[in-house]
Each structure stands twice: as C-alpha cells, then as structure tokens.
C-alpha cells in the first residue's frame, strides 16, 4: 500500500536520524566538539518531517481510520502510541533548546547526551511497535480506496507544512549527513 510504504520509508529515515543523534551524544560524552549546523539539521529533519508531517499524518488520518475499522484492542494500542507521540515532542523540544548552547555550556552538553541516551530506545521502540502492530493491521483492514485517500491526504498535509518542495530537501540533507558520519542509510 502506497500510504504505508511512505510511512515505513520515513521510519527508516527517522532511524538514521536517531543514530546520528547517538553519534553526537557519544562525541559529547568523550568531550569532543560537535558541528552545531549538523546537530541542527538532524533536529530540523526530526521536527519538520518526523513530527510535523509523519506524526501528525498518523494522528489525523491513519489512526482515526484504523480506530473505525479495528477492534477495541487496536484503539487501546492507538491511545498508547498517541502518548508516545507526546513524549517524542517533549524530547525534541528539549534537544532543540539544549542544541542552542552546546558550544558554550558543559551542562547543556551533558544534558543533551543524557536526553538522547534515554529517549532514543523509546523512540525506536515506538517505530518498531507501529510497524509490527498497526501497519500490519492496516494492510489487512484498509481497502485500496482507503489507501488512495490516505496517500492523497498525506500529500496535501505535507504541501501545507513544507511547501511544494515537500520532504525531498530534508531527506537529501539527512542522507548526506548519514554518509558523512558513517551512519547506515536504510531508506530504499
Ligand atoms: Fe507514530
Ligand atoms: Fe510512525
């Protein structure tokens, strides 16, 4: 299904973004400097594509449709995923705030590394859980017409958030960073 392929590809890009954050955190733990523009570019990807596009598309379009088509157990799963979206937003807010003072403040460097180390396993788990439980369910209950509707809604949402260029410049920038830092690029 086109809409689910779209979401899975984004998960793979987000996974590379999380690995980049871990790379920066490891450098900070070893008292090495990090390039502020690179940290900001990864956070910009995670906020603009991961949060404003991917999470919001799930919340506004995919989850409500699955709640209508799935069981009450699926509704409970969606409730948990929404709580995790809230936690992810909080993490991104914290990291964006700390990133502004990495060059000048040792406490910010420690807090940034600590936040990344704590949050990344939770964020990875969220992506895995969605793919294992929810996207698999979607493949069994959604019709081709649902898929076409979701794909159309996803496209409209992204144009509203990111303009005509859409995600492509963000994804290219992240792929370039992944290559530069030796982080696996999983996007097919
Ligand atoms: Fe999600
Ligand atoms: Fe997701």
Image (tube, rainbow, N blue to C red):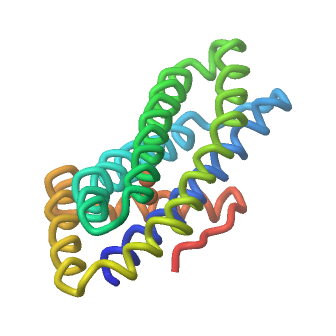
What is the number of callouts on the image? Answer: 0
Camera-side residue: 2 or 183? 2
Q: Residue, x 40% and y 43% (percent of image)?
A: 82
Camera-side residue: 118 or 36? 118
Q: Residue furthest bottom?
A: 144
Quadrant including the N terminus: bottom left
Residue 98 at x, y percent in the picture: 55, 21
Q: Residue, x 67% and y 67% (percent of image)?
A: 184
127 relative position to 3: left or right:
right
Residue 156 at x, y percent in the picture: 14, 63
Q: Quadrant of ligand 2?
A: bottom left
Q: Residue furthest front?
A: 72
182 shown above or below 35: below
Camera-side residue: 130 or 157? 130
Q: Residue furthest right?
A: 30
- Quarter of the image for residue 5 reads bottom left
Q: Residue, x 52% and y 80% (percent of image)?
A: 188
Q: Residue, x 47% and y 75% (percent of image)?
A: 136
Residue 110 at x, y percent in the picture: 73, 21
Residue 109 at x, y percent in the picture: 69, 22
184 relative position to 88: left or right:
right
- Quarter of the image for residue 79 reads top left
């Amino acid at each position: 299904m086109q809409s689910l392929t779209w979401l899975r590809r984004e998960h793979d890009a987000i996974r590379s973004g999380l690995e980049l954050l871990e790379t920066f955190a490891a450098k900070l733990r070893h008292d090495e400097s990090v390039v502020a523009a690179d940290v900001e570019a990864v956070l910009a990807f995670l906020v603009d594509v991961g949060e404003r596009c991917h999470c919001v598309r799930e919340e506004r379009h995919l989850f409500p449709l699955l709640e209508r088509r799935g069981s009450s157990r699926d509704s409970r799963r969606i409730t948990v995923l929404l709580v995790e979206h809230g936690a992810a937003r909080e993490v991104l807010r914290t990291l964006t705030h700390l990133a502004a003072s990495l060059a000048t403040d040792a406490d910010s460097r420690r807090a940034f590394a600590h936040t990344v180390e704590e949050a990344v396993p939770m964020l990875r788990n969220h992506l895995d859980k969605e793919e294992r439980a929810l996207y698999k369910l979607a493949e069994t209950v959604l019709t081709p017409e649902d898929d076409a509707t979701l794909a159309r809604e996803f496209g409209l949402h992204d144009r509203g958030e990111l303009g005509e260029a859409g995600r492509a410049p963000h994804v290219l920038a992240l792929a370039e960073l992944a290559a530069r830092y030796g982080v696996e690029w999983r996007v097919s």
